[in-house]
Amino acid sequence: MKALYLIIPFAPLLGAIAAGLLGKRIGRVGAHSVTIFAVLLSFLCSCVVFYDVQQGNTFNGPVYTWLTMGEATLKIGFLIDPLTALMMVVVTFVSLMVHVYTIGYMAEDPGYQRFFAYISLFTFAMLMLVMANNFLQLFFGWEAVGLVSYLLIGFWYTRESAVYANLKAFLVNRVGDFGFILGIALILAHFGTLDYAPVFEQAQSLESGMTLICLLLFMGAMGKSAQFPLHVWLPDSMEGPTPISALIHAATMVTAGIFMVARMSPLYELSETARSVVLVIGAITALSMGLVALTQYDIKRVVAYSTLSQLGYMTAALGASAYSAAMFHLMTHAFFKAVLFLAAGSVIIALHHEQDMRKMGALRKAMPITYWTLLLAAISSAGIPGFAGFFSKDAMIEAIHESPTPGAGFAYFCVVACVFVTACYTFRLVFMAFHGKPRYDAHHPPHESPPVVTVPLILLAIPSVVAGYAIGDVVFGNYFGESLPAPDPNYFGIWEFLEHGFTGLPFWLALAGIATAWYCYLRNPEMPARVARFFGPVYALVEKKYGFDELYSWLLAGGARNLGKGFWRGGDQAVIDGLMVNGSARMVGWFSGVVRLVQTGLLNTYAFLILFGILSGLTWMVWRYWNFVK
């Protein structure tokens, strides 16, 4: 099995190298063939490993010793357990579908081979992150996904907006990663090792400092998983091509923070304060970002803010110690969110890269496959019983409701209110894009996308519907074993869970959200404008994303520029140039001017100076002798 462990991450890496370095030689067909084959191989091997782990076979060991530093040895190693196996299957399957979809979406792009190299490299980085058995390799994968996301968000580097977006993502993540690496440094200082197993074993004996370690690690998760207030980069990541939006939002990058906190659950269980912070931050993110989605008209940005909101759900569940429920929602979310993004991309292709939902409408008949797959994903996202999103979302909501963690009451209100908001903005997208009157250019009528686009949509839509029925084993069973804390045993079967879902408050709130979207965007299209006028400044504040972009631009970007100017004027100009460089030159010039006064070239002047020197010397000697005699 060790050979399979190596194949899983390194097959996409080799595919990326081949497409990136040999792209011109092997051509477009060669580039997508080698990368798709590599990811397919990785997916098949992940399935074999998943089955092997189900049989009770796990692995935790080093692969390569990178550095010996005193008593600490830094290694590259793999931890293969149920948590890792689940992530491997999800990452490789979604990545495989995105690779196939990319053939159709990027067909006319001049950077075709480069794009396939990037997304294959992205898959490698995420796999290295989830398979790590130590903090060193975790940090390598953590930074690698950040680097590749920078390259992909700014893929169309001739666009100023794309360059701005990738720099924004990179810099915001540096803020979170600063805390993350400090947390890793504290772990090394306290435990003397970076391997997970000994750190988890010794954690119980750490009397102080665990809260600080957990909060610093969570700073990294706030950046990667775009949690308030480090969420601002994720909506701008829509500047990249749609396939990478799907990959970032569904299976890589933003899920890294959720996975990391779940993997570190033995540490977070030792700090109620840290869990409370995680819980409250997740709840705030879920509701506040869902409200922003209601004000957006760019179809990709609506789905992007949906991702922010769903990540908030997962984060809140982690804070409530519902780690298995959070990871289950990560899986179901990966499927239905990939469908939402790829279906949005299909619409964009059909409308010649139009993304404004106000210029869509009545696409249902022209694009039936895209419509039905997106509708299934929307129903799952809204949490309607029977669909995958319902099972995972209700499990998280119930866990937050029952949680004794401080802040759980506030968090429960946020996540329950967010059920209505989620259903409303999701079906707002469905109704505006696919129903009502056509608002697109009649001279360029839309058409269904080719099979290379629709087949991945269908394959991803299937688990968006049925994946939730694994809840018994994954959330309430012993699937995760020792990987995560023991789940809540209060579970009586799938049908009882469904029955409870139909009678619970979230179901009726979801129906109310769908009905509200129908009324506002189909029955009475003037209503949204009236609502916006009624709420006035509040609506404007939400529409502007609460002003965080402007605040950060003024406070951080402007502050950094002013600080730089201060160092330039006060440090470079005044101290270095003014005092040290030009000041020393002026000092030499002044001293030279003084010396020049006695360097006249006249003999009588020199004779006078010599006599003056002799008389001065004699006077000093006589004075010394007189003092000695006395």
Image (tube, rainbow, N blue to C red):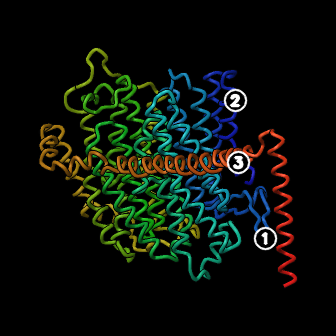
* In the displayed structure image, the side of residue 384 where residue 567 appears, left or right: right
Q: CA distance from mark 1 to mark 2?
A: 40 Å
On the question of residue 289 being in view, the answer is yes
Q: Nearer the viewer, mark 1 or mark 3?
A: 3
Rendered residue at 43%/33% (across/down): 161
Quadrant in which the N terminus is drawn:
bottom right
**Identity, as a three-letter code, of the amino acid under mark 2:** Leu
Q: Residue 477's x, y, as percent? A: 49, 68
Tell me which label, 1 or 2, sits earlier in the chain: 2
Q: Is there a contact, CB below 8 Å, between mark 1 and mark 2?
A: no
The disc label shown at residue 594, or none: 3
**Identity, as a three-letter code, of the amino acid under mark 3:** Val
Q: Residue 325's x, y, as percent? A: 44, 63
**Disc 1: CA contacts within 10 A as few (<14), some (14-19) or many (>=20):** few
The disc label shown at residue 71, or none: 1
Q: Residue 600's x, y, as percent? A: 77, 40
Tell me which label, 1 or 3, sits earlier in the chain: 1
Rendered residue at 84%/54% (across/down): 611
Q: Nearer the viewer, mark 3 or mark 2?
A: 3
* In the displayed structure image, the side of residue 66 where residue 159 appears, left or right: left
Instruction: Name which quarter of the figure residue 376 lies in.
Output: top left
Residue that mark 2 sits on: 21
Q: Nearer the viewer, mark 1 or mark 2?
A: 1
**Identity, as a three-letter code, of the amino acid under mark 1:** Glu
